Amino acid sequence: MSKQYSVPFDKVNITGGFWKDRIALNESVTLDSVRRRFEDTGRFSALGCNWKQGEPDRPHFFYDSDAAKWMEAAAYVLSKHSDAELESYVEELIDRIERNMTPDGYFNVWYTVVEPGKRFTDRDHHELYCAGHLIEAAAAYYEATGKRRFLDLMRRYAELIETVFCREDSAAFTTPGHPEIELALVRLYRCTGEKRWLDLSRFFVDKRGNNEKDRGQASGFASEDYLQDMIPLREQTQATGHSVRACYIYSAMADIAYECGDRELLAAANSIFKNITEHRMYITGGIGSTRVGEAFTVDGDLPNETAYAETCAAVSLAMFAQRMSLTAVDSRYADTVERVIYNGFLSGVSLDGKSFFYENPLSIDLSKRNIKYWRGEEVRLPITQRVEVFDCSCCPPNVARFVESIGKYIYSYDGDTVYVHQFMQSDTDIDMNGGTVHVSQITDYPSDGGVTVCVGGAPVKLAVRIPSWCRDFSVEAKLAENLGTSGGYMLFDCRDGAKIELYFDMSPIIVSADPSVHEDSGKVAVMRGPVVYCAEGVDNGDIFSLSLSSELNAEPVDLGFGIPALDVDGTRISGSGALYAPADEMKHEPTRIRLIPYFAFANRGESDMQVWMSTR
């Protein structure tokens, strides 16, 4: 197992381009929009534990986690910019938590005001999930501000969890229904240096699917498969169950394998990653193909119109892939991060930064919304317009914290090599064995395929990812020797002042799915660089009568999305008026089809949409 070190996002300056604009929008709009909606819906006031039985607006059992993810996002902003008002707001939320924490270190809104006296009795009520997000927020806030109060509170909570689950074994369950505490404990270990938290995380990972107490607790759609309980994680080879829960626990597997040198656990994580990316992932990087359990199903089952592809699931896959990238020089991991961040994640937030999708379908046919079913029955389809808050509003704060920390996905390093995983205009200083290395990128990626990487300071090797979508590229190196390729990365031996100029050909390409994906049989999609495109009715009228030509003859069009739209060649079919007729009687008229980046769909009103289209 190779071991790289991620360069933290607060050590990376994103100096321009697509992601600088996105981060600015996140800080100026998204964070405040989520805050206001959480105030309106009582998520923040719930931390005060003032609700009484019989009153309206009972807090939900996962409100703690919604608030915690927002606090984590706020901490990330504070790590970059001083903001007294924002910091004061977070401090007030910490006050509420501190006032309502029990003497033994317990804090949970639901089990304080709704079901007091029943803590650690219901595996499905997100108790440790909420604790995990609070721990992550506390670590982030300490790292941003140097203030220990929140961290010390959550450390006390972690001590209680350690006592109840490891020493006493007094809880009604052994592992949580919704993973997250495992990730958080690794983070607490890294923040404090206390190995007990790494050991506790490993306890939860090793006990999942591997203890008697949890067996038989599954019910309804919360099956053993849904809960990652069917077999020990070390024996698992396929992605199963609830997609967010799955990739959170897979991320923890990668973390523990990394920290402990656990090759068996890493091999299992690799098998699962391979299954996801080769059989159970949408072209957009979305995962979880059914709303029933928000879950993975079987290989090749990737329906477009009913795709679940939760925004949080996209975040969780990027988290898993990034962790795996630190264990091996293998571009598959960073390729997956790239597929997610420009497509299935980014579609989860509106272009104005105010509203969100929970689900991210790959096709919308508005005519089906008018079907009247017998006796009020209905076929549930994803919503067609983003909203500012959901009853289950896990995605909005996840978007905020993910965008704000996007810089951590760009660079890593080991003893003698700096790795460039993602192409974003940025710079960073890295302290390595041979001294300090300065690395910067100048690029308008993914609008343009040009990337210039400059290296200064101590001599160093530089590994630059070759994107999997790229079929042709050029490279020129100054004060750097090209050492060839390994694991999907170009390797250079760089001296002070080295400049490496790359150009990745971003000509749009037509993509087909594997025949095992029956939903996409006979259809194609269009990609330009890492970006997946779609057609919308607002531009094209009846998109279901369109076919793409085999030669696209694409022309870029600026519609203000930050990445160009494309006008391409195609045909429009029209019939004879008969419901069924000989195929040679159908008329195919040449036309131009406008395609937009998938992430930008549903920003101009309700419209039909599809990613996969027929071709002639």
Image (spheres, rainbow, N blue to C red):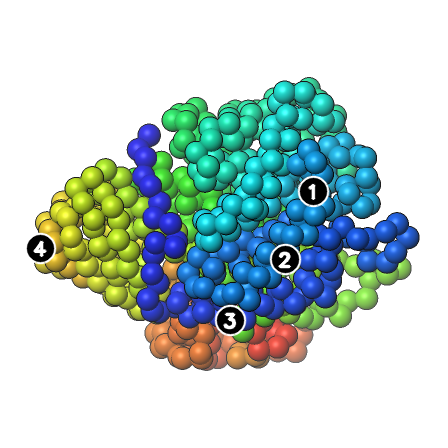
Q: Residues within 10 Å of mark 3 (few under 14, many from 20)?
A: few
- Residue at coordinates 32% horizontally, 39% vertically from top-left? 4
Percent coordinates x, y for residue 580 in the rendering: 65, 68
Nearer to the camera, 393 or 429: 429
Type of amino acid under label 1: Met
The amino acid beneath tag 4 is Leu
In the image, taking residue 386 as reference, residue 526 lies left or right, namely left
Mark 4 surroundings: few (<14), some (14-19) or many (≥20) residues within 10 A: some
Q: Position of residue 16 (x, y in %)?
A: 34, 69
Q: Is disc 1 placed on a helix, strand or loop? A: loop
- Rendering coords of residue 311 (x, y %): 57, 55
* Residue identified by numbered label 2: 92
Q: Nearer the viewer, mark 4 or mark 3?
A: 3
- In the rendered structure, which disc, 1 or 4, sits on the residue that comes first in sequence? 1
In this rendering, which labeled residue sits more in front, label 3 or label 1? Answer: 1
Nearer the N terminus, badge 4 or badge 3?
A: 3
**Marks 4 and 2, Cα distance to the nearest angstrom?**
53 Å
Query: Residue at the spot x=65%, y=78% of the render?
Result: 577
Total tally of numbered discs in the picture? 4
Instruction: Name the residue beneath numbered marker 3.
Output: 28
Residue 479 numbered tag = 4
Q: CA distance from mark 3 to mark 2?
A: 21 Å
Question: Which circle's residue, 4 or 2, is located before the other in the chain?
Answer: 2
Amino acid on which the number 2 mark rests in the picture: Glu
Q: Is residue 220 visible in this depiction of the protein? A: yes
Identified at 55% across, 49% down, the residue is 137
Look at the picture and state if 459 lies above or below 1: below
Q: Are marks 4 and 2 in contact (CB under 8 Å)?
A: no
N-terminal label among 1 and 2: 2
Query: In the image, which is nearer the foreground, mark 4 or mark 2?
Result: 2
Q: In this image, 553 relative to 400: left or right?
A: left
Q: Which residue is mark 1?
A: 101
